[in-house]
Amino acid sequence: MNEISMEHALYYLQTLTETSSDAIAIINSSEEIQFWNTPAEQIYGIPFSEIKGKKISQFFKKEDLKLLEILETKKPVFNVYHQPRPDMHVLISSSPIFDKDGLLIGAISIDQDITNIVKLNEKLALTTSQLQKIKQQANWQEQAGPLSEIKGNSEAVQKAKALALKVATTDATVLIQGESGVGKELFAQGIHEASLRKDKPFIPINCGAIPEALFESEFFGYEKGAFTGADKDGKAGKVEMADGGTLFLDEIGILPLDMQAKLLRVLQEKEVYRIGGNFSKKVNIRVVAATNSDLADMVNHGLFRDDLYYRLNVVTLNIPPLRQRATDIPILVNNFMQEYTVKYQKKTPTLLPSALEMFTHYPWPGNIRELRNIVERMIIFNDQSSIHAEDLVDIFPTVINDQINKEGLAQEKAQLEKERIKEVLIETYGNKTAAAKKLGISRVSLYKKMKEYNI
């Protein structure tokens, strides 16, 4: 095979850098810019024609440049958080470039724009905080009582609610276990509302929704000047924000091992250090954690710290899946029908026995979240005053009646679920976080199903 000519190699490199959606910069050993793709122009606001051939330090502070650091250390770095502008957040990966004789000839930097992810996470935290304040101002807990949003009269759910109310009056750490979609956060909020901390903040952290590079700043916050672009006054982390109240750690099983160690220290010492800070701040928090993973099994496989597991597992609250509380399904269906007829300004239809039977016989792998979604679709697509079973054929993933063999039903359900997952992954261009959100399941559940269905 003929060797690639220098001219062709340059064309290949140019095409490669322009194909990437990330900002790519390449400097030579003299710190001069050789390549600077279009996303780099967009992110940093500097045209290639203006920066080409010039030292990169003319345009950026030296302490902000990983490329110059790489020229000195000759070692790559991956996914380092950086804020080049107050309104922009990126993850930087950078590597040295050597020739065939091992001589350092330059360095390359690839910057991934994660601004939207950070802003969405901040918006979610703000919305949750605002909702909590509204609930406290309206004094819902006194009007209807804690856990009133958890509907159902089955023995399984009443037992779970009774245990939640009993432990709520203490400061004991609670580990809520249950499948995706069973309402673990509602139980956590109910425990907070029934506690002596009810007038203090309820701060949730979805461990599955935070980019790994941002875990530490989200949990512990940072001092002013901790990194480039940091808020001039610093920023409190979620642990500090929960002082006096309840910290809810959702999807705790996803937390990386190094963050598990830091969280354990906070729980043991009841103090937190901000990034870049030299002094600790005492925090008085009550921790409620939730997971749909088998943490004990993760401990056995070295995926979860045993000391943190025992620290969290003081009281275990197991939330039953919907299939184990079938008598609650009519109550939940009616509740969601009322909600969505108001939302879409429709009259509440009558659900006939044949239609209700489809709801009660369906296995609900997505639990209450899936039930809510199907009721919403039913209200949107049906305009009849009475709903029969045949009206739900296109609403349910699978038609359920007494004549369908259970084994065949399970196989059909699995095939439909597999196809649905594949469709959503295509729609989201392989973005598993977005796909999981669209499917109404956690990212961990999506990975499990992809493995199960060999997707």
Image (cartoon, helix red, strand yellow):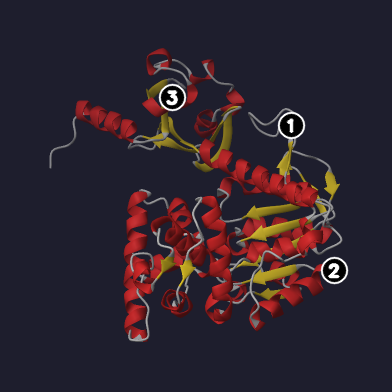
Residue drawn at x 70%, y 58% is 248
Report which residue position mark 1 lands on: 224
- Which dot marks residue 29? none
Does residue 265 appear in this view? yes
Q: Is residue 67 above or below residue 356?
A: above
Residue 191 in which image quadrant:
bottom right
Q: Is residue 302 above or below residue 406?
A: above
Does residue 37 appear in this view? no
Question: Do residues under tags 1 and 3 come within 8 Å of each other at their CB atoms?
Answer: no
Residue 280: image location, x then y, percent? 83, 46
Report which residue position mark 2 lands on: 169
Q: Is residue 233 left or right of residue 374?
A: right
Residue 214: image location, x then y, percent? 60, 45
Mark positioned earlier in the residue sequence (3 or 2): 3
Quadrant (top left/top right/bottom left/bottom right) for the N terminus: top left
Given residues 31 and 326, the one toward you in this image is 326
The label nearer to you, 1 versus 2, is: 2
Tag 3's secondary structure?
A: helix
Q: Could you tell me how far apart the alpha carbons at marks 3 and 2 are, in whole angstroms?
A: 54 Å
- Which dot marks residue 42? 3
Quadrant (top left/top right/bottom left/bottom right) for the C terminus: bottom left
Count residues near mark 1 (Cα–Cα under 10 Å), then give few for <14, some for 14-19, many for 20+: some
Residue 271: image location, x then y, percent? 82, 52
Q: Is residue 300 above or below residue 187?
A: below
The amino acid beneath tag 1 is Lys
Residue drawn at x 42%, y 21% is 33
The amino acid beneath tag 3 is Gln
Question: Do residues under tags 1 and 2 come within 8 Å of each other at their CB atoms?
Answer: no
Mark positioned earlier in the residue sequence (1 or 3): 3
Residue drawn at x 78%, y 64% is 145
The label nearer to you, 3 versus 2, is: 2
Residue drawn at x 62%, y 60% is 257
